[in-house]
Amino acid sequence: MGTHIYQSRFFTLLVILSLLVSGALSAQNSSIFQTLGQIVNQEVTMIMDFESINKLRKKDESFPGLLKYKKANGDSVSWNVKLLVRGRYRRLFCEFPPLKVVFSKTDLEAKGLAHFNDLKWVTHCFDGPKQDENLLREYLVYGLYQQISPYSYRTQLLKVTYINANNPDQQIVRFAFILEDDGELSERLGLTECKNCFVIKQDAIDPKSENSVSVFQYLIGNTDWSISRGQKNVKYFQPSTGGKMVVIPHDFDFSGFVNAAYAVPASGTNLQNVKQRAFLGYKAEKAIWEHTMNLYDGKQKGFIQYIESFPLLSEDGKKECIQYINSFFSKDARKLLATQEN
């Protein structure tokens, strides 16, 4: 009997160790996001039924797609995926709304990839070159915020050929970009997402994180977001070690930096256009403001270099974006500080 108990405990220990090793290996595996990020401006093909986009704009129902591309080593890859129309405004307004691309976890495991299977796929809104320009500017915003905070989404720019599954001659070639899975972001940064935090008390949020995000939204001229009036275009994550929630922003197409033709300021801001700025964050203590302004000091040059070095944006677009960034550092940052001191 003693031998049986010993063997049973030994077997249980082996199972636990196996699970721990398996979990560690899974954490070390590359993700589908990383695979798509191995080539700069990765070219991909997405085959799907174009009509499903219109049919399912108001529904959270998936439809099939086939994603094809080549890896860095030249190997061709095909994935059967599920597609969902996503977004709040853009899903109803845009001719080609943003998508959620969902991979089979079984397929990912079979190819030795991590289990993170959900990618936000940001698309062009309408047809025409200007739409690529808007999308590229929004892509740049994510890169700008990555210079401010490690608590930010990684992105990957794609050159996509969309093919109508029911009419292969109907094709659309446009830029898109993807955001990493929320679970991947959480694991990478040691965070736990608060998924049911639509309304969250101010004292539950890390004040430095909130103020940094609020100033960044002000810098890019974005009023299409909220913390104080309920969660909108931000997500809350708690460090796994404990502590207050950090804020991670997303969706910047209504910002003055992007300056999309369809964008309008949020109601109640009394702004005439999205190029004007309004601060929507909480009032903060002087020490928090000093921390944030010190964080932003010295970023102007890096922001400008980042924009200038981006080869896909038009020269006029670069000039406009740089002028807008400069207007924050030259005058609007001081205006903001003055309003907080009163």
Image (cartoon, helix red, strand yellow):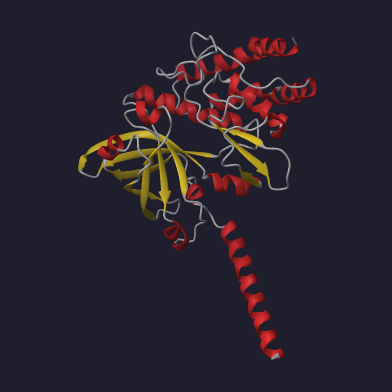
Q: Is residue 1 left or right of residue 167?
A: right
Q: Position of residue 179 (x, y in %)?
A: 50, 40
> In terms of image quadrants, where is residue 334?
top right
Q: Residue at the location (51% across, 20% down)?
A: 255
Q: Nearer the viewer, residue 21 or 315?
A: 21
**Could you say which quadrant of the image residue 168 lies in?**
top left
Q: Position of residue 53 (x, y in %)?
A: 30, 37
Image x and y of residue 111, in percent: 45, 61
Residue 210 picture quarter: top right
Q: Position of residue 300 (x, y in %)?
A: 64, 21
Can you say whether 296 is above or below 41 in the image?
Answer: above
Is 135 left, or right, of 17 in this rendering?
Answer: left
Determine whether 297 is above or below 112 in the image.
Answer: above
Establish if 122 lies above or below 283: below
| Quadrant (top left, top right, bottom left, bottom right) of the C terminus | top right
Left or right: residue 298 versus residue 114 is right
Q: Up-down: is 273 above or below 251?
A: above
Q: Nearer the viewer, residue 39 or 186?
A: 186
Residue at screen point 58% across, 44% down = 185
